[in-house]
Amino acid sequence: MPKYEVHNQLKNVLHSDISNQEKAKYLAHYYWKAAVAVLVALGLVGSFIYTQVTAKSQAFNVSIFANIANDKAQPGIEKQLDKWITYDKRKQTLAVSWDTVSASAAAMQRLVDGIAASEIDLAVVEPKIYRNYQKQGSVDVLPLTAAQVEKYKSKLLFNSKGKATGVVAGQLPLFKKYGLDKQVLFVSMTSKHKAETKKVLLKLLEQ
């Protein structure tokens, strides 16, 4: 039916003497699809707004990519970090992840994406991965003073320029207790939480 005919028909119905209930049924016949579409759109918009308002930002992120698995590590490490870092728990969250790289090729992609998106502050990886990332320029110099480097040098790894860029995970009690040994901890070059990273690194070394 042409649009002008529909318009005229609707106009006649609205001005007729039939009951309001009959008018409502008639209008529903023509507009129910549009009404449903509007309601769905409003629901999606409302959901998006709610997500944006209630979403928490990261206060700190530690990502572990190792050839071993440990189901108890994630909550245990997160519990310890919660004691070291001060943050607004209503608006922020601590992020600790553990990926078994030998079991999932997708794990390596998460590491790549996490560093590229500045979502990872500290990473613990297999030695080969650490060396590769060091060559690529994704590994930052550890935020330590000369005195601190001298104090903890037995736990540290150095680049070709003599700069401390890694820590042997097995030398850190928090990680050693969960089975990490030869893996290497490093600071991501794209870390957004510099102060927290330095604080956590020192706490790890002091244990």
Image: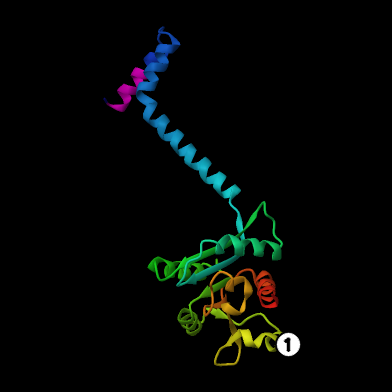
Was residue 207 drawn as part of the magenta stretch in this picture?
no
| 207 vs 19, nearest the viewer | 207
Q: How is the image coloured?
A: rainbow
Residue 199 location, quadrant: bottom right
On the image, the x and y values in percent for residue 121 come to 59, 70
| 198 vs 167, nearest the viewer | 167
Classify mark 1: residues with Cα within 10 Å, few (<14), some (14-19) or many (20+).
Answer: few
On the image, the x and y values in percent for residue 66 come to 48, 72
Give the number of callouts: 1
- 181 sits to left or right of 35: right
On the image, the x and y values in percent for residue 21 come to 43, 12
The magenta span reads 2-10
The quarter in which the C terminus is drawn is bottom right
Residue 23 location, quadrant: top left
* Residue 131, placed above or below residue 110: below
Q: Residue furthest left?
A: 1
Q: Residue furthest top?
A: 17
Q: Which residue is mark 1?
A: 147
The quarter in which the N terminus is drawn is top left
| 14 vs 147, nearest the viewer | 147
On the image, the x and y values in percent for residue 157 come to 58, 86
- Say what amino acid the circle numbered 1 marks: Ala
**Element at badge 1?**
helix
Was residue 9 drawn as part of the magenta stretch in this picture?
yes
Q: Which residue is rendered at x = 58% and y = 74% of the image? A: 176
- 115 sits to left or right of 27: right
Q: Which residue is rendered at x = 57% and y = 78% of the image? A: 170
- 163 sits to left or right of 101: right
- By secondary structure, the bulk of the magenta-drawn segment is best described as helix
